[in-house]
């Protein structure tokens, strides 16, 4: 009577959350992603748009590129993408074009979500591929990481504004 050791969607989302926290540590919007094939994590990434000065450096986009390299093929059939925020049109489009089987996301994105919130690219019969999309996995935790990041950013901007240009510290040499 062995214990069930299957890895769950929540377990994989926790891995994506760890990537999101790495992004926050780098000053990037905290979104993380992992790609799983046959029960194994084959790629992981987090947002790097600022660091790389690359508009396509979204977590899931970078993870999908790494997965293609890991599998040595562009067709990512058999893969599931776990991402902390609902993918945008660009990333959802890449999921269609790379033929993934499934995308699991944490928090919905009311400003850009393309897997059900604003658009549903995963089930658009006009496109050449459809895939399963499931949202809300660890939604509260995924949303909290984003909220905290932007809250801290607003507080820092407010503090900098309060300080003003005349409040600069005197040079240490004087």
Image (tube, helix red, strand yellow):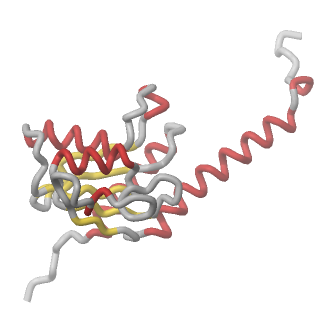
Q: Nearer the viewer, residue 40 or 133?
A: 133
Residue at (39, 58) in percent of width and height: 119
Residue plotted at (39% across, 53% down): 18
158 lies left or right of 57: right
Q: Quadrant of the N terminus?
A: bottom left
Measuring from the top left, give residue 75's x and y in whole percent: 10, 45
Q: Position of residue 77 (x, y in %)?
A: 10, 53
Is 164 positioned to the left or the right of 134 in the image? right
Tell me where residue 48 appears, x and y as whole percent: 42, 35
Kindly tell me whether residue 85 is visible in this rendering. no
Where's residue 104, x and y in %? Answer: 30, 63
Q: Is residue 44 visible?
A: yes
The image quadrant of residue 74 is: top left
Of all residues, the one furthest to the bottom in this rendering is 1
Whether residue 18 sits left or right of residue 34 in the image: it is: right
In front of the other: 108 or 16: 108
At 22% from the left and 60% from the top, the residue drawn is 125
Image: 8 above or below 99: below
For the C terminus, the quadrant is top right
Q: Residue furthest front?
A: 126
The quadrant holding residue 13 is bottom left
Number of numbered markers: 0
Q: In this orientation, which residue lies closer to the viewer: 141 or 134?
A: 134
In the image, farthest residue toward the top: 173
């Amino acid at each position: 009577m062995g214990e069930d050791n299957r890895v769950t969607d929540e377990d994989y989302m926790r891995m994506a959350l760890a990537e999101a926290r790495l992004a926050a540590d780098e000053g990037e919007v905290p979104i993380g992603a992992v790609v799983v094939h046959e029960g194994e994590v084959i790629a992981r990434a987090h947002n790097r748009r600022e660091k790389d000065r690359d508009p396509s450096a979204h977590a899931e986009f970078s993870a999908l590129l790494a997965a293609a390299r890991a599998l040595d093929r562009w067709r990512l059939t058999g893969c599931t993408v776990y991402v902390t925020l609902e993918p945008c049109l660009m990333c959802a489009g890449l999921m269609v074009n790379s033929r993934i089987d499934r995308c699991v996301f944490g928090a919905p994105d009311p400003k850009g979500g393309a897997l059900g919130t604003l658009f549903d690219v995963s089930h658009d019969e006009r496109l050449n591929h459809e895939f399963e999309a499931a949202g809300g996995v660890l939604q509260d935790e995924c949303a909290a990481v984003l909220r905290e990041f932007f809250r801290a950013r607003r507080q820092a901007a407010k503090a900098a504004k309060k300080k003003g240009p005349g409040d600069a510290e005197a040079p240490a040499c004087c």
